[in-house]
Amino acid sequence: VHVRYGEAQAMLAGDAMQALAFEVLTPQPGEGPADAGGSGVAPALQARLCALLARAAGHAGMAGGQAIDLASIGKPLTEGALLDMHRRKTGALLQASVLMGVACGRCDDAAHAAFADYGAAVGLAFQVVDDILDVTQESQTLGKTAGKDLVHNKPTYVSVLGLEAARRQAAQLRDAARAALGRCGALRTGLLAQLADMVVDRDN
Amino acid sequence: VHVRYGEAQAMLAGDAMQALAFEVLTPQPGEGPADAGGSGVAPALQARLCALLARAAGHAGMAGGQAIDLASIGKPLTEGALLDMHRRKTGALLQASVLMGVACGRCDDAAHAAFADYGAAVGLAFQVVDDILDVTQESQTLGKTAGKDLVHNKPTYVSVLGLEAARRQAAQLRDAARAALGRCGALRTGLLAQLADMVVDRDN
């Protein structure tokens, strides 16, 4: 969008799309196709979904993580600070997408906590693997410029831990995600297990 | 923010603040001071407030209006197109701020429609007056650079209608806003009437 329409319009598109997410979560009577029945989503559920998304997208989540990322360029980060940044930047929104699904269903507190653990592990794994792919893949496979993190002097799991330790970390996170699903009781979690594998095994 | 911290951080601050608005509208149990009781706001009201804000901030509201504004630089706009742009860019969010207050109280459909008319009129008046002040005030009074619209070749109420017609328009909108309040029944609307005056009579 920024190449085709300029930076200002791209920014506005982003602003509009963030608002659109909350619009979609709060269907009003009379909106959308008649048979979709906007009012069919209970208001209390709408509110819960908005609460989860807002917290994952904002200062404590994606926007905050990205701000830390920008502010950290060229600076050494401890593993703890890197973890905090990635939990916000990628982890929070991926975890929220799991918990929003959970909110639409029903489960006990133990299963809810397990789903939260699963989402956090998969979210963090996604970022660790992203960092790995940036140094191990060609741009063509990646579909974006490889080696960008190094060029921009960005702290990553690979620069902080080294490639092998980053790979071990990704594998551990996949195991943690799968273990969490084991605590979800009788709920069917096969697709979520596959998703954890896909996030870790992907090559782009 | 963009001067002090750079454009990227300023953009992220905006993203985070948009999310924060929805966070504030959906207080969760256990958040905030204990005596404020986050859970004291009924979930259905939270959902309604999010719905109003999302629609006023996004493509049909502020972001969409600003996008039209940007795309209109240097192009002649009809009065109808200018009206549509300003209704979105400024009117929608000002109207939403009125209707969100209304949602927190109780009123019948007629009063609700009257408040909506009031909000639309005040929102549009705000923008018409903004356009007028841009050509009639010094930068010092305005607190921002005067004459910017002309320099940027932006269509405004003054460039489309002329200064005198723009002033008449502002006065008519104030009258319309006050007339709408007259249809709100026995509800106390004195502060809203003062607000309409303030929006039109301001000099910065």
Image (cartoon, coloured by chain):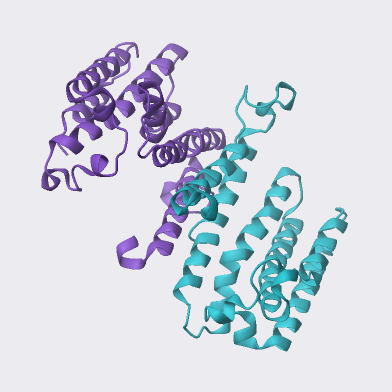
Chain colours: A purple, B cyan
Q: Is residue B115 left or right of residue A203?
A: right
The percent position of residue A185, horizontal first and vertical second, equals: 34, 11
Residue displayed at 63% across by 78% down:
B147
Instruction: Please say if B170 is above or below B26.
Output: below
User: Viewed as shown, does residue B143 lie left or right of B191?
Assistant: left
Q: How many marks?
A: 0
The structure residue drawn at horizontal position 60% and vertical position 86%, both measured from the top left corner, is B160
**Residue A82 visible within the image:** yes
Horizontal side of residue B130 vs A49, given as left or right:
right
Which of the two residues, B17 or B5, is positioned nearer the viewer here? B5
| Residue A203 placement: quadrant | top left
Residue A32 visible at all: no
Q: Which of B203 and B197 is in front in this view?
A: B203
The N terminus of chain A - image quarter: bottom left
Occupied quadrant, residue A115? top left
Q: Give the vertical position of A83 relative to B192 (above or below).
A: above
Q: Check the picture and name the quadrant holding the C terminus of chain A.
A: top left
Residue A194, percent from left and from top: 21, 25
Residue A99 screen position, x and y as percent: 42, 27
> What residue is shown at x 35% (from left), y 22% (from top)?
A79
**Towards the viewer: A57 or A167:** A167
Q: Is residue B129 above or below residue B158?
A: above
Name the residue at 20% across, 18% down: A168
* Residue B154, image x, y percentages: 54, 79
